[in-house]
Image: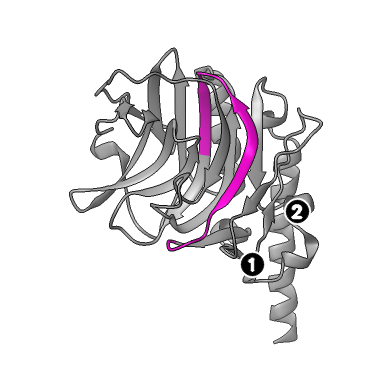
Amino acid sequence: IAGIAQGSKLIDSFHLQNARSLTKNSPVNSIKGLALWYETTLSESFNESETDNESPITVWHDINPQHASIKEAVSVGDSDALYIKKGQNDLPVLKFNGTDNTYSNATLQLGKDMSSFAVIRIETLGANRRILSINERFYFGTLNVSGTSEFRSFYGTSAGWNHHTSFGSDADLATNKYYILSSNLKDSINTGYVNGVNVGSPTGSTSETKEPSSGITIGSSIIGTQYWPGYIGEIIIFDRGLSDINRKEIEKYLSKKWNIPVSS
């Protein structure tokens, strides 16, 4: 029994060390325009005192190497997500309860174009669920559509949304399964990807335009609604629309780290 336990610990350690190496050597570090990067495997991602299994996380540290000042995401009120030591590929993830877990950073500055990536797993379907929101001008998350959970990504304000129609059936997500979601907003055209598969560019334009914005909320809308019910392992945002080459490089890195197959 002791030998089995020791072997399990060695395997866990291998997965974690391998993930840390992949992160440190990832192309994300050198691709121009990295705005922020939250992940769960590095020692600097969280306060050490909060990394016991199921410990509440009060601060999620930005590991962006391109900026001198990091952009911490701080839990709002007492709404801390839980640190889960063994999530996808036996790596740590954050568990959001879908009720009040949310994190905020008010200093992130973004222009009119951006690219976003997230490693997620949704647990329950129902109403709109947000992975992240940026100053109410950009929405990145999943919606419940006709009994399925569909990844959507669009921008605008409460007065109206651009490119808000369905991505289509290829964007339907299943519960209890991890995905790599990508969204590339470039020259007012927003394109979504699920595990590397292009799920289209929605239409449905209004008079609203994408303007420079500041601030980010993780796990809900800016105003504290549409809470995320599930897990998040990594979030990466660039302050520009990426080329297909750069996007695929990042998706391949996330695929290898989290053991989630992606389309080449």
The residue depicted at 52 percent of the width and 60 percent of the height is 101
Q: Check the image and report above or below for 204 versus 138.
A: above
Residue carrying label 1: 56
Magenta-span inclusion, residue 83: no
Q: As drawn, is 205 to the left or to the right of 13?
A: left
- Give, as a single range, the part of the protein colored magenta: 98-117
Query: Which quadrant of the structure image shows residue 107?
Result: top right
Amino acid under disc 1: Pro
Q: Is residue 124 rendered to the left or right of residue 38?
A: left
User: Is the magenta region chiefly helix, strand or loop?
Assistant: strand
Q: State the residue in front, 224 or 130.
A: 224
- In magenta stretch: residue 116: yes
Q: Position of residue 63 (x, y in %)?
A: 73, 41
Camera-side residue of 177 and 236? 236
Q: Residue furthest left?
A: 146
SS at circle 1: strand
